[in-house]
């Protein structure tokens, strides 16, 4: 067992605890970025001028009429940028564009004394456009050959020979939609400049260091002149990994030019129409099976809808390609990936980061092909699960593959799946207009950033003279419980009660050069960095305590704030006494911690290597009931067994599994993004701009019975205290819901009916699918 993963007997980690800010959340006392405005004097408010065209050249921009509006102080345009007019890391996202690339694109920003004055000022700005041809759908981009970024190719084995000799070969296409993040807190930033020109920006961002970098290059200053802080976010889900940078830069630019604090907060419609979503994909595929139902070959082309700029589309595509196998051994694989350029918001990170888009392709294939092969879909999936001797198509050994089987078996037994299948068959035989089905799907999800350099983290830990502890790390809190886990890690490593530890807000002048809180790696990276810092301090204190107790430092034990030797009944000291003594001996009581994930190597061009530290596993069974008259359905029961290693905080992890599953079910069944595809004046306009038109999961979509269990005896060597990531993997457990809907729709037809089910599988989509099943697929 590694020192990183080794857990002491009396640990604070592993104890079920509520979220560290839970009481503040439910009482409304938790502060978010925009709450700081009322605590700041003389704030100016920013409002955008948005394009009504999907693609157009700006012929003229007249801002003078805005100054006639009472309260307007400044209109920000490209001429005001002292540095680089770009908000993206790929230098393809002008902050103030000459050519608008999507409907809703911000052209300039108005600053005013009140938000209403800023809104009226923006309405007064006069813009003349020259409309240009636009591509709104991924199919239009494919037909036009309009791609961006670097295409990728992944291949292992001999696909053509395997398909030629396979007794069963199928082919098809599958296009599936993106997803709106719809976090509760929209994008917001508050920027101030002090007397020395130091820029301080409060931002709702998952990536403060990159927000800092973008602000610096827009303003033409060094990074040390910019400090970014993130108190907490009201949700992020990947939508605040890249998207907040430009908004923070606008606020910082306004504050620099006016000398006054500038607040930028998007309303819901602005946030939905201006920010990126989960990438929708188009896929085409050929697949081969042997007579026993084993996958022998897969040939697929994945086309991601990147929107108007690259953003994170390249790594999203790469992760999709690396996850097209999901949990299944496919000896011969060929996958080509490309990124379509369309006149829509620049699509971005979303929980799962391409993994769901790759995995849904193979799940769709298995769901379609099972009836054609004469197999029960559950059995077809089980017999194709990875075994311990297998490697992925990109050459990474599938370590702990036996956990897939363990999760599968536990769901089968704890969920009484066989008995319920018999009950469902009996129910369906008696009900012509209502059908039920149960489906099981697995998850194998790689944990680490695609880009190896991002797999590093820092932390800063202070022990004060009174024995209290302050920790600061590079991760951001978006409600996922990261800070709760980090408090538990610090208390465990130092051997003090949790009440002695406090956590400071994430900010770039405390821990520099941080990676985004993303890729499910927040606890792995920052927890290891905190542990490293705490170990440095603890080692020094053990030296001090050993001297006072007259024993070897290696024999010192610090547990729950009490310091003693290993000898029973020996002298004891308090944590505070040892800290006090250390200070008077001039022993350093603070430390900077660092961690880099070991064992990663990845050739992005060859798509070969071991890009992940480990795989997270899980299995879900979902039972649905579908109404044959409307296609409406209800989720009757869900049973999940998920591998989180040795949990750092079980209550937090259970919440993440439940929330991720429901969000995944929303993507696959409810959340239907619609852009205007007509040739009229509203072409490219997002029609689903609010909760009134964009259906989100609610309590009515929750399963009536929701059983979630953590896989036991799942210690992960080489990860902090033996834990595993839990942020993203549970989202893909929701494939079970979509596959259950497919099987329920098929039950309206004859035995062996194969159902082609769109995604999202809305009630309307399910209705037309079951109608096709009723009519024999005609």
Image: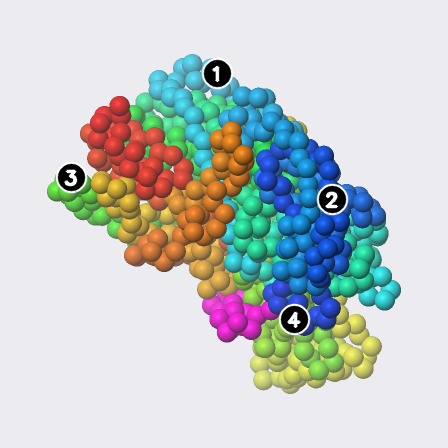
Q: Residue furthest right?
A: 196
| Residue 30 is covered by the magenta coloring | yes
Mark pair 4, 3: CA separation: 60 Å
Looking at the image, tell me whether mark 1 or mark 2 is earlier in sequence order: 2
Q: What crowding class fits label 4: few (fewer than 14 Cα within 10 Å), some (14-19), or many (20 or more)?
A: few
The residue located at (39%, 30%) in the rendering is 365
- Residue 548, picture quadrant: bottom right
Q: What percent of the width, then of the height, locates residue 269?
A: 54, 51
Asked whether the residues under the numbered discs 2 and 3 touch, taking CB atoms below 8 Å apart as contact, a structural biologist would say no
Quadrant in the picture for the C terminus = top left
The answer to whether one can see residue 776 in this image is yes
Characterize the magenta stretch by its predominant secondary structure: loop
Q: Which residue is mark 3?
A: 432
Q: What crowding class fits label 3: few (fewer than 14 Cα within 10 Å), some (14-19), or many (20 or more)?
A: few
Looking at the image, tell me whether mark 4 or mark 1 is earlier in sequence order: 4
Q: Disc 4 vs disc 3: which is toward the camera?
A: 4
Q: Which residue is mark 4?
A: 38
Looking at the image, tell me whether mark 2 or mark 3 is earlier in sequence order: 2
Q: Which residue is mark 2?
A: 62
Q: Disc 2 vs disc 3: which is toward the camera?
A: 2
- Residue 133, picture quadrant: top right
Q: Which residue is mark 1?
A: 160
When the figure is inspected, residue 70 is found, relative to residue 402, above or below; the finding is: below
Q: Disc 1 vs disc 3: which is toward the camera?
A: 3
Q: What percent of the width, then of the height, locates residue 60?
A: 73, 38
Mark pair 1, 2: CA separation: 60 Å
When the figure is inspected, residue 325 is found, relative to residue 253, above or below; the finding is: above
Magenta stretch? 11-31
Looking at the image, tell me whether mark 1 or mark 3 is earlier in sequence order: 1
Q: What crowding class fits label 2: few (fewer than 14 Cα within 10 Å), some (14-19), or many (20 or more)?
A: few
Looking at the image, tell me whether mark 4 or mark 3 is earlier in sequence order: 4
């Amino acid at each position: 067992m590694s020192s990183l993963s080794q857990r002491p007997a009396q640990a604070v980690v592993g104890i079920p605890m509520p979220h560290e800010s839970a009481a503040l959340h439910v009482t409304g006392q938790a502060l978010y970025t925009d709450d700081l405005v009322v605590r700041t004097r003389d704030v100016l408010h920013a409002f955008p001028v948005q394009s009504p065209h999907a693609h157009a050249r700006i012929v003229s921009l007249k801002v003078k009429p805005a100054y006639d509006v009472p309260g307007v102080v400044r209109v920000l345009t490209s001429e005001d940028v002292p540095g680089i007019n770009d908000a993206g890391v790929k230098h393809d996202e002008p902050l103030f564009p000459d050519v608008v690339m999507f409907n809703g694109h911000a052209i300039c920003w108005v600053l005013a004394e009140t938000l209403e004055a800023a809104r009226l000022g923006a309405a007064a700005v006069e813009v003349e456009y020259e409309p240009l041809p636009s591509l709104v759908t991924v199919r239009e981009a494919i037909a036009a050959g309009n791609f961006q970024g670097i295409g990728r190719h992944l291949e292992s084995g001999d696909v053509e020979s395997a398909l030629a000799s396979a007794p069963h070969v199928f082919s098809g296409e599958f296009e599936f939609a993106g997803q709106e993040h719809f976090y509760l807190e929209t994008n917001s930033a508050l920027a101030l400049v002090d007397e020395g020109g130091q820029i301080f920006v409060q931002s709702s961002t998952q990536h403060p260091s990159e927000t800092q970098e973008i602000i610096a290059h827009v303003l033409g200053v060094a990074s040390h002149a910019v400090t970014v802080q993130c108190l907490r976010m009201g949700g992020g889900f990947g939508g605040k990994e890249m998207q907040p940078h430009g908004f923070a830069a606008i606020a910082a630019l306004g504050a620099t030019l006016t000398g006054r604090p500038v607040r930028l907060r998007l309303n819901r419609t602005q946030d939905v129409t201006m920010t990126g979503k989960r990438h929708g994909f188009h896929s085409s595929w050929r697949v081969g099976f042997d007579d026993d139902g084993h996958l022998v070959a897969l040939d697929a082309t994945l086309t991601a809808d990147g929107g108007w700029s690259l953003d994170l589309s390249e790594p999203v595509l790469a992760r999709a390609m690396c996850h097209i196998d999901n949990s299944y051994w496919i000896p011969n694989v060929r996958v080509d990936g490309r990124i379509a350029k369309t006149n829509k918001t620049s699509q971005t990170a979303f929980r799962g980061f391409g993994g769901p888009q790759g995995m849904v392709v193979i799940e769709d294939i298995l769901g379609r092909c099972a009836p054609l092969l004469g197999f029960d879909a559950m059995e077809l999936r089980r017999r194709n699960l990875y075994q311990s001797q297998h490697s992925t198509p990109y050459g990474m050994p599938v370590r702990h593959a036996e956990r897939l089987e363990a999760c599968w078996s536990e769901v089968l037994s704890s969920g009484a799946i066989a008995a319920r299948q018999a009950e469902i068959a009996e129910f369906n035989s008696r009900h012509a207009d209502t059908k039920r089905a149960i489906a099981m799907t697995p998850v194998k999800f790689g944990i680490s950033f695609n880009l190896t350099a991002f797999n590093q983290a820092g932390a800063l830990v202070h022990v004060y003279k009174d024995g209290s502890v302050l920790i600061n790390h590079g991760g951001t809190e978006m409600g996922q419980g990261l800070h709760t886990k980090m408090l538990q890690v610090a208390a465990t490593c130092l051997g003090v009660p949790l009440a002695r530890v406090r956590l400071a807000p994430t900010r770039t002048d405390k821990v520099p050069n941080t990676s985004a809180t993303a890729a499910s790696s927040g606890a792995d990276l920052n927890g290891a960095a905190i542990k490293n810092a705490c170990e440095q301090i603890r080692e020094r204190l053990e030296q001090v305590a050993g001297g006072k107790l007259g024993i070897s430092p290696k024999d010192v034990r610090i547990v729950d704030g009490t310091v003693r030797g290993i000898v029973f009944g020996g002298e004891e000291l308090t944590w505070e006494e040892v800290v006090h003594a250390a200070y008077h001996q001039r022993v350093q009581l603070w430390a900077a911690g660092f961690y880099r994930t070991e064992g990663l190597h990845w050739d992005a061009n060859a798509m070969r290597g071991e890009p992940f530290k480990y795989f997270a596993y899980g299995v879900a069974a979902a039972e649905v009931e579908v109404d044959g008259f409307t296609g409406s359905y209800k989720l009757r029961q869900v049973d999940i067994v998920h591998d989180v290693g040795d949990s750092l905080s079980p209550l937090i992890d259970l919440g993440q599994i439940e929330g991720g599953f429901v969000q995944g079910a929303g993507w696959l069944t409810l959340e239907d993004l619609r852009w205007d595809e007509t040739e009229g004046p509203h072409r490219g306009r997002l029609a689903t701009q609010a909760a009134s038109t964009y259906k989100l999961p609610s309590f009515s979509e929750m399963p009536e019975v929701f059983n979630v269990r953590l896989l036991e005896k799942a210690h992960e060597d080489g990860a902090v205290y033996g834990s595993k990531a839990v942020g993203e993997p549970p989202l893909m457990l929701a494939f079970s819901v979509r596959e259950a809907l497919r099987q329920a729709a098929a039950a309206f037809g004859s035995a062996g009916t194969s159902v082609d089910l769109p995604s999202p599988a809305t009630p309307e989509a399910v209705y037309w699918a079951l109608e096709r099943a009723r009519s024999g697929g005609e």
